[in-house]
Image: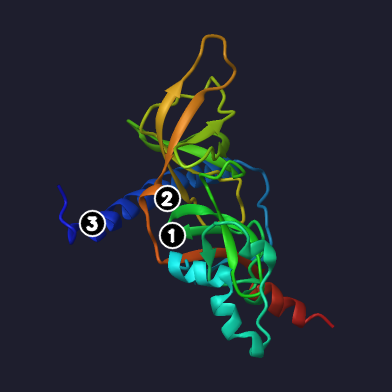
Amino acid sequence: PATPTDVPALHQLEEKNRQLLAENAALRKQLEMARRESALPVELSLTEPLLMPEMTEARLLGQQAAGLWREGGLLDQGQNAGIRESSLVLAGEAPLVDLGASSGLKTGQSVSAGRTILGRIDQTGRWTSSLLPVTDPRYRGLAQLVRRTPSGTVYGGQGILEGRGDGPCTLRFVDSTEPVTVGDAVFTAETEDELPWPMYYGRVIRAELPPGAAWWEIDVEPASRSLQPAAVQVLTTVIRPTRQAAGATVP
């Protein structure tokens, strides 16, 4: 068994392996696209996208700090400074992120720890925001299987990842014609254009195809359940600097 000092190193190796797995599959996809584009009779010239992703560093409040924040203990200390917080954020017991609307956070933005998706921003206040974990029954996200084959790592079928409580998630609507195996990795779908790279959800722990069914029945163990990160990253979007510069030169 790993000693306590081995655990951070093990997490780093797992994170690196997930990163390489996603990058391998993405490179194979790009190679296929390049081959198709090279067969076109004319060369296409595309402008850069207007918006680009930006990862904003934040921290998860510990249970004690979050409790004081919700009870007003910390807010009371700042009343004279005009500090007020949204009742939607203060209600409930969801994890709290130490950034809010004043830092550009908005409902629906993805929250990750490294390359692992933790959930998304649920409610935003001025100073803090609540996190909707991937395990929450309200969570929905486009997801894609990534599997290893004799010829390399490839993208598999796409579906919708749904939370169902504190346990495994469900991956729905993966077509019955797609190959699925226990142990396959599950990442954010490549159609999630706002993400800077594929992000890791977890791995398949159950995959069954009932006779005559149109879709697989798939359970996914979310990697977020094994993490207790202090620092997280919130995905925001900004206008691409080159597009801003180009716009500034237009009379």
**In the image, farthest residue toward the bottom:** 80
Residue 94 in percent (x, y) is at: 55, 56
Specify the amino acid type for callout 3.
Answer: Val
Q: Earlier in the sequence, mark 1 or mark 2?
A: 1
Residue at 69% in and 72% down: 243
Q: Considering the numbered disc 2 on the image, is that residue within a helix, a strand or a loop?
A: helix
Q: Which residue is mark 3?
A: 7
Image disc number at residue 43: none
Q: Quadrant of the C terminus?
A: bottom right
Mark 1 surroundings within 10 Å by alpha-carbon count, few (fewer than 14), some (14 through 19), many (20 or more): many
Compare residues 38 and 155 and report the one nearer the observer. 155
Q: Which residue is mark 2?
A: 224
Classify 233 as above or below 75. Answer: above
Provide residue 216's location: percent of width, then percent of height: 52, 23
Q: How many residues crowd mark 2 within 10 Å: few (<14), some (14–19), many (20+)?
A: many
- Residue at (50, 67) in percent of width and height: 67
> Residue 111: x and y, percent?
53, 59
- In the rendered structure, which amino acid carries the disc numbered 1? Ala
Q: Sequence-wise, which precedes: disc 1 or disc 3?
A: 3
- Residue on which disc 1 sits: 113
Q: Residue furthest top?
A: 211
Coloration of the structure image: rainbow
In the image, 98 versus 63, the foreground residue is 63
Figure check: 247 above or below 193: below
Q: CA distance from mark 2 to mark 3?
A: 15 Å
Q: Amino acid at mark 2?
A: Ser
* For the residues bearing labels 1 and 2, Cβ distance under 8 angstroms: yes
